[in-house]
Image (cartoon, rainbow, N blue to C red):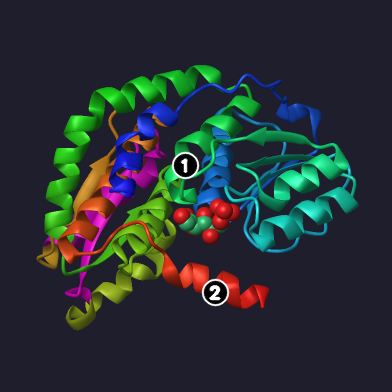
Amino acid sequence: MKAQEWIEGLPEQFVVYEITSISPSAYKGIVFTGMGGSGIVGDVLKLFLEKDGVAVPVISLRGYELPPYVREGWLLVAISYSGNTEETLSVAEEGIERGLKVVCVSSGGKLREIAQREGLDFVAVPSNYAPRYAFGFMLSAVMSLFGKKDPIERIRKHLEESKGEIKETAYRIAQVIQNYIPIVYGTPLTEPIAFRWKTQINENSKTLCYTATLPELHHNEVVGLDNPITRNLCHFIMLWDPEDHPRVKRRVQITEELFKELGLAPIVLQGKGATLEERLLYLAYLEDWVSFYLAEFYGYDPLPVKVIDRIKEALNE
Ligand code: F6R
């Protein structure tokens, strides 16, 4: 099965792209734009750059339009695996009109044509994958763009070494959450990965899944746990990182206690690895396998996303 082959091969997607790197401080701000399996790349890069202490604002944008304050002097990184996603193309065109420095990342499509037409920097990723299965290629391309080359090598080695253990853990998690709506809680550091869990479970396992993030979820979501009828339809997963803010870590403990009082057993996970990058990619790879096994248990082929294709066709009519 294609999906399994691609998930097996994720570690090998972490390769350094030999491209001229960009210094964030040369710009007034940075916008990443992309949707779905490409959009997640911007979320993760924003987090990595902020962890590195980036001195300018960084935005990860999903949609058709740039915010009004994004003007000349900003950098726009447009990421679309297919190169044909209309929201991403719209933002790229707007960025060109406003005089931003625009870099395009795709396997081809209209985004490559725009880059050629305008003489923009273009980073090509390998073609013939489904976008969400090319996450490692796209992330490596954008990390390389920002000169984060050592972490790419470390992630590759780490995922290769951890693959066996990740698959075993994923299988057990998929068994536990089967027949429930998975709810994935994140923290400020794990939020993009919690969102990736949701989207991969949606697309690969054809299953509803929702996320919420600490500390915000302590101000609303937790009250929703009062109702046992809806609570018991769900299984809860909580992703956190040792580098999270101390008060966030305390909130993770409190959440676990709350669950225990309700007789619920959340799956609490932190990524393994020496660095934040390694730990987050460990959790992302774990989720690829969880969503794969969950699809298998429900009898779905993880690959097709018919309704997404249908919507794109309807928009093109
Ligand atoms: C399909 C997938 C989708 C796409 C999204 C945007 O595998 O993951 O979420 O990523 O529809 O398309 P691209 O990535 O081609 O811009």
From the viewer's perspective, tell me whether residue 202 is left or right of residue 92. left
Considering the image in quadrants, where does the C terminus appear?
bottom right
For the residue carrying disc 2, how many other residues have a C-alpha within 10 Å: few (<14), some (14-19), or many (20+)?
Answer: few
From the viewer's perspective, tell me whether residue 185 is left or right of residue 82. left
Q: Given the current orientation, which residue lies at the most extreme left position? A: 263
In the rendered image of this protein, does residue 64 appear above or below residue 280? below
Q: Position of residue 152 (x, y in %)?
A: 47, 23
Q: Quadrant of residue 107?
A: top right
Q: Position of residue 166 (x, y in %)?
A: 21, 36
Mark 2 = which residue? 311
Sequence-first tag of 1 and 2 = 1
- Check residue 257 for magenta coloring: yes
The alpha-carbon separation of the residues under discs 1 and 2 comes to 22 Å
* Residue at x 33%, y 43% (from the top left corner): 240
- Which range is magenta? 231-260
In the rendered image of this protein, does residue 181 appear above or below residue 36? below
Q: Quadrant of residue 145?
A: top right
Mark 1 = which residue? 135
* Residue at x 68%, y 56% (from the top left corner): 88
Residue placed most toward the observer, 7 or 46: 7
- Is residue 145 visible in the rendered image? The answer is yes
- Check residue 297 for magenta coloring: no
* Residue at x 49%, y 68% (from the top left corner): 308
In the rendered image of this protein, does residue 96 appear above or below residue 211? above
